[in-house]
Structures are given as structure tokens and as C-alpha cells.
Amino acid sequence: MKQVQRGFTLIELVMVIVILGVLAAVALPKFVDLKSDAVKAALQGHAGALSSAGTINFASRTIKGTATGNGTFAMGNCQDAATGLQVSLPSTVTVTAASLSTTAATTCTVTDSSTGSNITTTFSAVGIN
């Protein structure tokens, strides 16, 4: 009487697991780049903080006036928005020095060079004297 084989042998199952393990070890790092995603998210957070600082400064300066000593500052270019932050930006983060318009929002660029390739994002700011 002839036996009919049903299922896989142990060797076949082990070989499939080994092949899947090798593929996962080689292919996964190419598809999952967590560092640049984290840097981009952090950079977007910095841009949000710069935008908020500029907006709060604009509102305060509009209400309080431009006198010195009232906790506000003049914003003539995009880099001035960093003045309103309570902490400084990391050394790898730079803000463009584009001049700000006092009548319309200007798009400012923030760049992070910590990963070797520059990652950029933008925020909007309005100038005020």
C-alpha cells in the first residue's frame, strides 16, 4: 500500500523560515527609514513653534505697540521668529533670512542638515516693526 504525503516536512518548513528571515533582514531597512521620518517630524515641530512665536509676537505688538520693554520684538526677516522661542533651535537647524512683508504672509524655509541630506519644511510669518 502506497502512503500519500500530506503537509510539509520539517526541513521544508525550516528552509522557508530561513529564507523569510534573510529577506526581512535585507529588505526591511531599505523600506523603513525611521531616522529621517523622525527628523522631518521634529523639523515640522520647530516650524510650528516658529510660526506660533511670530504670530503671538505680531498680536502682542499690534495690541501693546512697538515700545521697547513690552516683551515683544521687531520681525524684519524669517530668522527673527527664533527670537520669540524660549529655547534655541538645534545647531543643525537653519532658518532662511528672507525679508518679511508687513502686509502679507511670507513663506519661510527651515532646514535640518543632521542626516547628511538637507530636510526642509516651511512656515508662514508676517513682518512687524
Image (spheres, rainbow, N blue to C red):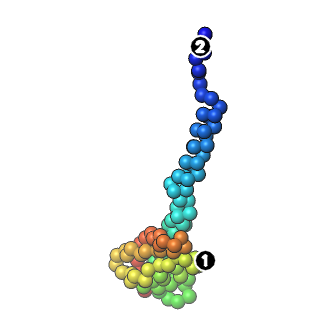
**Disc nearest the viewer among 1 and 2:** 2
Report if the CB atoms under discs 1 and 2 are less than 8 Å apart: no
Residue 93: x percent and y percent?
52, 76
User: As drawn, which residue projects farthest toward the left?
Assistant: 103
Residue 121 visible in rendering = yes
- Quarter where residue 128 is shown: bottom left
Residue 53: x percent and y percent?
51, 74
Nearer to us in this view, 54 or 7: 7
Image point 60% across, 77% down: which residue?
87
- The Cα–Cα distance between marks 1 and 2, rounded to whole angstroms, is 80 Å
Looking at the image, residue 28 lies above or below residue 40:
above
Residue 4: x percent and y percent?
58, 17
* Circle 2 Cα neighbour tier, 10 Å, few/some/many (<14 / 14–19 / ≥20): few
Residue 120 in the figure: left or right of residue 90: left
The numbered disc on residue 2 is 2
Nearer to us in this view, 80 or 69: 80
Residue 109 in the figure: left or right of residue 17: left
* Circle 1 Cα neighbour tier, 10 Å, few/some/many (<14 / 14–19 / ≥20): few
Q: In the rendered image, which residue does mark 1 sit on?
A: 87
Task: Please state, as top left, top right, bottom left or bottom right, where the C terminus lies in the image.
Answer: bottom left
Image point 61% across, 10% down: which residue?
1
The amino acid sitting under disc 1 is Val
